[in-house]
Image (cartoon, helix red, strand yellow):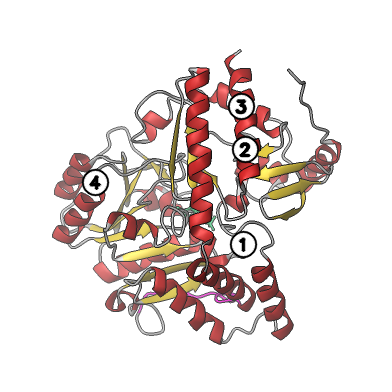
Amino acid sequence: MKKYTIKTIRSQALFQKAQRLMPGGVNSPVRAFRGVGGTPLFVRRAKGSHLWDEDGNRYIDYVLSWGPLILGHTDKDVVHAVQEAAMDGLSFGAPTIREIQLAELVQHFYPFAEKMRFVNSGTEAAMSAIRLARGFTQRNKIVKFDGCYHGHADAFLVSAGSGHLTLGISDSAGVPEDITKNTISIPWNDLPTLKEVFQQNKKQIAAVILEPVCGNMGLVFPEDGFLEGVRALCSKHGTLLIFDEVLCGFRVHLKGAAALYGVTPDILCLGKVIGGGLPVGAYAGKKEIMDCIAPLGNVYQAGTLSGNPLAMAAGIATLQKLKTTDAFPRAAKACEVLASGICENLKKSKLPFQILHQGTLFTLHFTSQKIRDLLSVKTSNITLFKHYFHAMLTRGIALPPSAFEVGFTSSTHENKDIEKTLRANLEALSEVKK
Ligand SMILES: *Cc1c(COP(=O)(O)O)cnc(C)c1O
């Protein structure tokens, strides 16, 4: 077999320098390649399904900036819209027509989003959604699920305590107990435990927040009846249900997980795709809930750059294209073909791994256990994943540098990209087996 290597001399030198200037050399931890070892690639530019690093190596990209780029890199309409907006002014701190246009587009895909507020990241969206839920219900506690990610606000950096019914403990330093004591984290797909939590915290739970399709422990689906069950319990107990669709929105289904499963939350969080590659988040919901936000209500939330014209322009161009072209079905088709090809390769190689996919998201789980929660995901063989990741990278395929992140496809992933990826996948699997 051909011996694969890539030269990453410039990336290595830049990483050395970056590490002197920034913690871990990065501005977001998972970029540092700690999950796979080695040197992160310093990206120079990208186009469509491909990106080029500083050493001139070319890769087929399945990270796509961790989700936003459903139209691929540097889509000409998105770039043009941003250029036009830039010529008119970078920021005004005053309302603009583009905010209305993006809001109307979001509403087209999520009709239950009667009102919304734009912010600058998914973190901000989820953090603000929780404050809104607490303000609206006059309650303090929130319930989340182990393995779901809702950004890095204090209240979410909590993993399960010793018993699942006990209050959470933080998995980050710097988060006061006073804050985490109001967060309860329980296993995904575990309705009986949620029922018990409601019993033991009567009239105290402001919100249950979840990723309706989990994408931050690899892809993990809700089991039949789970989302419906959570919805019913929330309604029964006067608790708001928050869908964090920052990742799965516009990705598992063009109209999101809410449409895919036919379950409607009280508050919706969006991000990633709605910014088309620029920093945007949003939270949305029924009028009477959203009207609790300042200036109408007494829940405070603000942002100097919120609704930024460039970010709105990128979002509008992206959602407009999703609405009026076959971009989504093409991206989903690419994912489907890729996943079924990997499934074939797994059969040939007789490895006990499994590929899950939905819409434009996929994960190759390195375990034979039935994937249903964080515990089962954690049975993945990390050593083999690291090996596989690098075997793919040296063949020009850029996957997310962690066993617990989903892969993304775009409308620019063509048949020849998928074929090349599948050949690399077959070789990489047999390399891993040795
Ligand atoms: C990425 C993500 C966030 C955080 O968004 P940022 O823009 O990184 O702050 C929140 N929730 C989910 C489900 C995410 O995938």
Which label sits in the foreground, 2 or 4?
2
From mark 3 to mark 1, how far is it between C-alphas?
Answer: 28 Å
When the figure is inspected, residue 185 is found, relative to residue 312, above or below; the finding is above
Which region of the structure is painted magenta? 298-308
Quadrant, the N terminus: top right
Q: Amino acid at mark 3?
A: Tyr
Q: Is residue 102 left or right of residue 195?
A: right
Q: Amino acid at mark 2?
A: Glu
- Residue 303 covered by magenta stretch: yes
When the figure is inspected, residue 267 is found, relative to residue 340, above or below; the finding is below
Answer with mark 1 or mark 4, whichever residue precedes in sequence. Answer: 4
Q: Amino acid at mark 4?
A: Phe
Instruction: Work out whether residue 36 can be spotted.
Output: no
Answer with mark 3 or mark 1, whichever residue precedes in sequence. Answer: 1
Q: Main secondary structure of the magenta part?
A: loop
Quadrant, the C terminus: top right
Which label sits in the foreground, 1 or 2?
2
From mark 2 to mark 3, how far is it between C-alphas?
Answer: 18 Å
Answer with mark 1 or mark 2, whichever residue precedes in sequence. Answer: 1
> Do residues under tags 3 and 1 come within 8 Å of each other at their CB atoms?
no
User: Which residue position is annotated with label 2?
Assistant: 419
Residue at position x 18%, y 50% from top? 198
- Element type at marker 2? helix
Residue 249 in the image: x percent, y percent?
Answer: 44, 58
Tag of residue 307:
none
Quadrant of the rendered image containing residue 24: top right
- Element type at marker 3? helix
Answer with mark 4 or mark 3, whichever residue precedes in sequence. Answer: 4
- Element type at marker 4? helix
User: Which residue position is annotated with label 3?
Assistant: 388
From mark 4 to mark 3, how far is it between C-alphas?
Answer: 33 Å
